Image: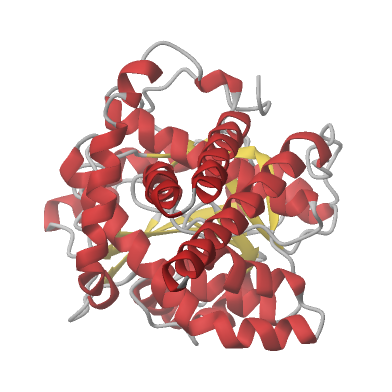
Amino acid sequence: MVLWLVVLIIVIYFGLSVAYLFVLTVAGRWWYKNPWTKDFEKPESYRRIAILVPAYKEDGIIKATAENLLEQDYPAICYDVHIIADSLQEKTIQDLRTLPLQVWEVSFRQSTKARSLNAFFGRNTQAYDLALICDADNMLDPQFLQRVNRAFDLGARCVQGKRVAKNMDTSYSILDACSEAINNHIFRRGSNALGLSCSLVGSGMVFEYNMIREVLTTIDSVTEDKPLQMKILSEGLSIEYLEDAVIYDEKIDSAQAFGKQRRRWISGQFVCLAMYFFPGWVQLAKGNVSYFNLGVCTNMVPPRSLLLGFLPLIAIGAWWVDPRLGYAGLGLWGLYLITLAVALPRTYYRRGLGKALLQLPGAIGIMALNLLHIRSGQKNFIHTLHTRTGIHNQVPYRKHGS
């Protein structure tokens, strides 16, 4: 009887997780209306925008990134690129100084993006309306700033752009790109479709300049995006998903890089659940559903790859205890597969996906092994080396599902 109850609780927990993802997926597919992508009209004004790029040991790619950021279809006098150089080589810094941008050299005993950004805000004296935070490997669609400016004309105060793959030339990079696209659909389109704030993803984030400067002073953690989004939500603000503002992000291309990256993500999820679980219920009592959703609900759902591997194992184990529970577990696995298939845009169903899926069992195994090493992700900054200096991807992104 005790074993039966334990298995029942496990099935219910995973069932609620799948149901949560399924509801967000359905909302993102059929209920989502994007108010931020109306045809361009003459803007009310061109806001002054600071593009902030913390760069830690990114000598191989940072100049190419900077050159791309300087090619925006936006008045040049209305935006500046700021490279926050942490542990870059002197030659790299000299090369950057030949470009029309500003370089800020910083150094820390333990480097984090939040510390680099806070160092910039503490030293900068120029006035800006908005701040766009990018990673050193990111490249922007030429109209990114135009679309952001338009969204703020329409009333947005915090915006998350659409982060997509910079490269899809290996099986692991395809899997990583698909994961990003699924997360965009579920946690950004789906959340906004239900009237909730979308989640931040770490780059392609745009905020009112003075607001983000003040909020970041309260953050000094290995990962900054989740504490940042929770602080913003605690102020009663909403984060809007700007689907047509595309930012390209380098995807991992090997099992080793996949493992390092996912260890950091899994660690961050556990930390966020512990940090925001009780405050989330307090905020829910105050009517702040978005805070509860991103602080509690999202963090209680197992990582998507682990769900894919664990559900059939749970179905098999439950069947030995009670065939009815086994069939329930099998049904949850089927519903989850449908959820992923609906959340993945049609443009990703192309040559190479089948070969990439053959690597999925190995990727799930890496994710499972990372559960044994999550403490290292909580205490240390895990740097992912980037090497791509161009966009090598022909998938069309402007229209979801096209």
Q: Position of residue 126 (x, y in %)?
A: 55, 72
**Is 114 on the left or on the right of 193, as rendered?**
left
Q: Count the labels in the image.
A: 0
Residue at the spot 42% in from the left edge and 68% down from the top edge: 3
**Is 359 on the left or on the right of 3, as rendered?**
left
- Report which quarter residue 38 is drawn in: top right
In-front residue for pair 364/227? 364
Residue 210 in view = no
Residue 360 in view = yes
**Is 83 on the left or on the right of 189, as rendered?**
left
**Is 382 on the left or on the right of 140, as rendered?**
left
Q: Position of residue 188 (x, y in %)?
A: 65, 50
In-front residue for pair 331/150? 331
Q: Residue furthest front?
A: 1
Residue at the spot 58% in from the left edge and 44% down from the top edge: 184
In-front residue for pair 133/93? 133
Q: Position of residue 374 (x, y in %)?
A: 26, 68
